[in-house]
Amino acid sequence: MPMKYPFSYIVKLQFLGFRFSGWQKQTNAKTLHDMVDKTLSFVFEDVNYKTIGVGRTDAKVSANTYYVQMFTDKLVDEVFFINSLNSNFSPDFRAISIQSVDRGFNIINSPKIKEYHYYFSFGDKNHPFAAPFIINIDEDIDIDAMMKGAKLFVGEHYFHKYCTKPSENTIFKRVIDSCEIVENDILTANFFPKKSYVFKVRGKGFLRYQIRLMMATLFEVGKGNLDLQFIETSLKEDNDRKYMRNNAPSSGLQLYDIELEL
């Protein structure tokens, strides 16, 4: 980063991604990064800035915790900044905090642990207002089998089947620290179904579409189309390396938490 930006900050955000085409800037698409930078143009009158997100998100994916590294050419009044940013943000966004960090800090390469949540229900169709947050499977599924299947992902495995469009340098051997399906008591609203569930996955790094492909596989287990042995085999080093074709809808996915080493 050129030294024309001598000051560096970490800004913590939350956002509802349902109306956006993911984080990364794209031509002819409404993206989260575009919205952040456009809002900053109203906050800063005589400050030049550049921003980098902690990672990409898919279209319609939301974040309870997200970090942006912001480089500026002038010192920022941190209290004024947060108040002004929230005043100018659309209702889809909220700024939580800002923290000054060393100019050499790199948000992309810094060690971090991410926790993703995927919210779903099954049976009767959900209220339309729930659409940005929770996916509905419109049939009865074996939730106990899905809970057992989720636990099989814990540990070090080979995730070739749970990644789309990998690069030549993609590392498929990954460690998942924890993985479970439990009843949802985290994200609630009076228009949510009486009972819903959350798939929680925690680890240092995830592949492209990995969580959604894992979720889709568990849905197939719940429907009886796949068994637990399939998951066990799919994670071995000698798996057939053909990625799963079913991808769970993105709006059920939420980047719930990030532990960032500052």
Image (cartoon, rainbow, N blue to C red):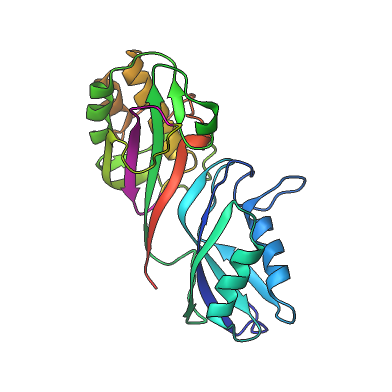
187 shown above or below 105: above
Q: Position of residue 24 (x, y in %)?
A: 63, 52
Q: Residue at x 37, y 19 (%)?
A: 220
Q: Is residue 227 left or right of residue 172?
A: left
170 shown above or below 72: above
Q: Is residue 49 left or right of residue 130?
A: right
Quarter of the figure with residue 78 = bottom right
Q: Residue furthest front?
A: 190
The total of numbered circles placed on residues is 0
Quarter of the image with the N terminus in it:
bottom right
Residue 256 visible in the snapshot = yes
Q: Which residues are magenta?
A: 192-205
Instruction: Choose between 164 and 191: the one closer to the eye.
Output: 191
Q: Residue at x 50, y 79 (%)?
A: 104
Q: Position of residue 146 (x, y in %)?
A: 28, 25
Q: Is residue 61 magenta?
A: no
7 shown above or below 221: below
Quarter of the image with the C terminus in it:
bottom left
Q: Is residue 201 magenta?
A: yes
